[in-house]
């Protein structure tokens, strides 16, 4: 697929307080409550202008800090198609899987990207094309892909519990 | 080839003979910690809880600590929902507002048992590595799923060995060590890794070890863990966790580590993390004289009895500078009580401190102690991210309790060796 969508570019160590300020953590939990505050202290234009299909390109250690899931939940809810970064912090990485948000870890792609370039993915092959250059990225193991493909961990869990409960009814 | 702590415990808990880094395993954690965010966690699965109930009423440890006492109607309602959930589902391990900061409560109440796995909907869950626990943070959604199923997946991490030798020389504290490590390997230096501390562990108290393990997440670690030695066993016995009731799992001497580091504790100096990143390391001597407006002593990193003792010893019979607000939050009710008996609270209050209820609020800008634009805070907490204490135009420096107490006295960042 060819992406002509907008790319939001950020640097290294974008932490969860920048993605979603801690002061809202215990008052904003739903997608609608989270959306207006996304990236508030990093880029005030983001929440106003982000559109479904947009991409985020970032440096290393994206999502470091708190275990709060509002960044992953919010980015999925506003329609971010994928985050591409040099590396991720682990709790954010899990949170993204749990929300069904696509993360791509590919330092070379980030280094190659310049404004206006076409970005294409091939998820099955684990490759990303920036302009006319192609880079590969590690794909997730099947048991983890199953969670993301179910639409996130809660859907996955419900399907599993439902199967177990049907089986025990037999 | 020998195995690391992480490889051993995950193999055992997954029921496998051995595991290798990168392998995905399914485990059933002994405990799941959740705090004020329990309200959001159960809110995601209301209908599922009606249908299936919780998998095990003993799995959860719930501690209200992040916004306590409630700041407004919304946080009060969240707390109320948690209390109703606890009652309805017969949750066995519930600690209401005022008991303490969740990580301190988990440890004090004996839920951090060596050789077990504890996950928590809080990034500083890694603190329990101080007692040989495989402890790591997860998000709310995963906590919701765990309430229903009791199991989750973990990727077997690669491991980093940090060998410690010698002894800290007061007023240098464990906080100075962990700030140095993070400054060296940076905020992503241990991403996805098990950080395993070895060497002269006997020179570190349990409080020291908790401070260090607590900040494992600030170097990206999945777990940061210490071996269970006589000191740990003695501590565990003192809180009712009997020797022999747990398994002491530790790395083989020929285990494979992707990186090995060594620190001479006697050579460390008082340090800070400068705004706005925890790995922005500097010696206190390099930033001395910077004016501060607020000091914070407390949090899951440095709110324990020995931390209050250090501050009280420095401030005994003295007054803090008039340009500083000095907030003190003991990490738990039992620490608060003990600090009162020992006179530390009296000393701190007489010196000009404001003692707040035991909890987390100011550390994450959620409740009390919010900074104004242009202000600067020197804090014993674990994060100095932009906006962390409620204002993106304020600055946070992180330091040890000794550095914070001495600096409160002078109203500017001050080397604690100055008064030793």
Image (cartoon, rainbow, N blue to C red):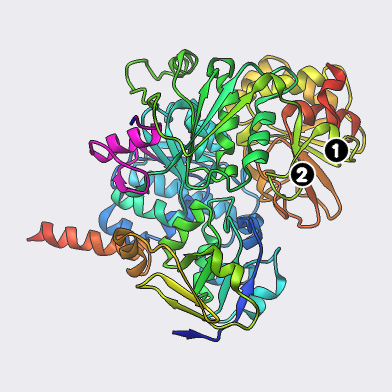
Residue at the far front: name it. Answer: A133
**Chain designation of label 2:** B
Q: Are marks 2 and 1 on the same chain?
A: yes
Q: Earlier in the sequence, mark 2 or mark 1?
A: 2
Q: Is residue A29 visible?
A: no
Residue B73 placement, left or right of B348:
left
Dot 2: few (<14), some (14–19), or many (≥20) neighbours within 10 Å? many
Residue B415 appears in the picture as rendered: yes
According to the picture, the residue beneath numbered tag 1 turns out to be B287
Which residues fall within the magenta stretch? B2-31
Q: Residue at x 53, y 37 (%)?
A: B102
The image shows residue B10, relative to residue B173, as above or below, that is below
Residue closest to the eye, B390 or A63: A63
Q: Where residue B66 appears, x then y in whole percent?
A: 59, 45
Is residue B278 inside the magenta stretch? no
Does dot 2 land on a helix, a strand or a loop?
A: loop
């Amino acid at each position: 697929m060819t992406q002509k969508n907008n790319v939001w570019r950020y640097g290294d160590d974008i932490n969860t307080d920048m993605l979603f300020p801690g002061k809202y953590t215990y008052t904003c939990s739903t997608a609608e409550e989270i959306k207006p505050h996304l990236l508030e202290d990093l880029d005030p234009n983001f929440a106003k202008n982000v559109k479904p299909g947009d991409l985020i390109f970032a440096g290393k250690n994206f999502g470091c800090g708190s275990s709060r899931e509002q960044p992953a939940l919010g980015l999925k809810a506003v329609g971010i198609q994928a985050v591409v970064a040099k590396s991720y912090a682990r709790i954010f990485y899990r949170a993204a899987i749990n929300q069904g948000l696509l993360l791509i870890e590919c330092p070379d792609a980030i280094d190659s990207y310049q404004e206006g370039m076409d970005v294409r993915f091939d998820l099955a092959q684990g490759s990303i094309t920036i302009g006319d250059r192609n880079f590969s990225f590690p794909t997730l193991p099947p048991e983890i892909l199953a969670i993301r493909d179910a639409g996130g961990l809660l859907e996955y869990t419900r399907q599993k519990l439902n199967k177990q409960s049907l089986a025990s009814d037999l | 080839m020998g195995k690391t702590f992480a490889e051993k415990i995950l193999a055992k808990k997954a029921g496998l003979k051995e595991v290798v880094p990168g392998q995905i395993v399914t485990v059933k954690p002994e405990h799941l910690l959740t705090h004020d965010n329990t309200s959001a966690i159960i809110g995601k699965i209301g209908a599922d809880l009606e249908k299936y109930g919780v998998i095990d009423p003993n799995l959860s440890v719930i501690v209200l600590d992040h916004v306590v006492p409630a700041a407004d109607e919304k946080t009060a309602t969240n707390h109320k929902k948690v209390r109703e959930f606890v009652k309805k589902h017969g949750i066995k391990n519930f600690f209401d507002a005022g008991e303490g900061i969740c990580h301190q409560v988990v440890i004090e109440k004996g839920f951090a048992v060596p050789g077990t796995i504890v996950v928590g909907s809080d990034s500083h869950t890694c603190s329990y590595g101080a007692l040989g626990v495989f402890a790591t943070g997860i998000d709310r959604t995963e906590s919701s799923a765990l309430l229903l199923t009791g199991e989750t997946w973990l990727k077997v991490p690669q491991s980093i060995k940090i060998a410690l030798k010698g002894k800290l020389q007061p007023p240098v504290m464990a906080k100075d060590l962990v700030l140095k490590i993070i400054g060296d390997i940076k905020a992503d230096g241990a991403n996805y890794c098990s950080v395993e501390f070895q060497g002269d562990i006997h020179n570190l108290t349990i409080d020291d070890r908790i401070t260090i393990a607590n900040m494992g997440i600030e170097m990206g670690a999945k777990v940061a863990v210490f071996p269970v030695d006589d000191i740990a066993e003695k501590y565990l016995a003192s809180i009712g966790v009997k020797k022999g009731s747990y398994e002491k799992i530790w790395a083989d001497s020929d285990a494979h580590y992707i990186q090995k580091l060594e620190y001479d504790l006697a050579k460390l100096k008082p340090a800070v993390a400068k705004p706005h990143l925890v790995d922005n390391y500097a010696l206190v001597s390099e930033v001395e004289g910077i004016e501060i407006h607020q000091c914070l002593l407390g949090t899951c990193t440095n709110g324990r009895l020995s931390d209050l003792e250090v501050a009280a010893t420095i401030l005994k019979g003295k007054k803090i500078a008039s340009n500083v607000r000095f907030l003190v939050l003991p990490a738990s009710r039992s620490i608060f009580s003990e600090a009162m008996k020992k006179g530390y609270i009296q000393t701190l209050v007489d010196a000009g401190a404001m003692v707040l209820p035991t909890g987390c609020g100011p550390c994450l800008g959620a409740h009390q102690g919010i900074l104004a634009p242009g202000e600067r805070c020197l804090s014993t907490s674990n994060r100095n991210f932009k906006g962390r204490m409620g204002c993106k135009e304020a600055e946070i420096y992180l330091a040890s309790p000794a550095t914070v107490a001495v600096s409160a006295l002078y109203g500017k960042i001050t080397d604690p060796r100055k008064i030793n």
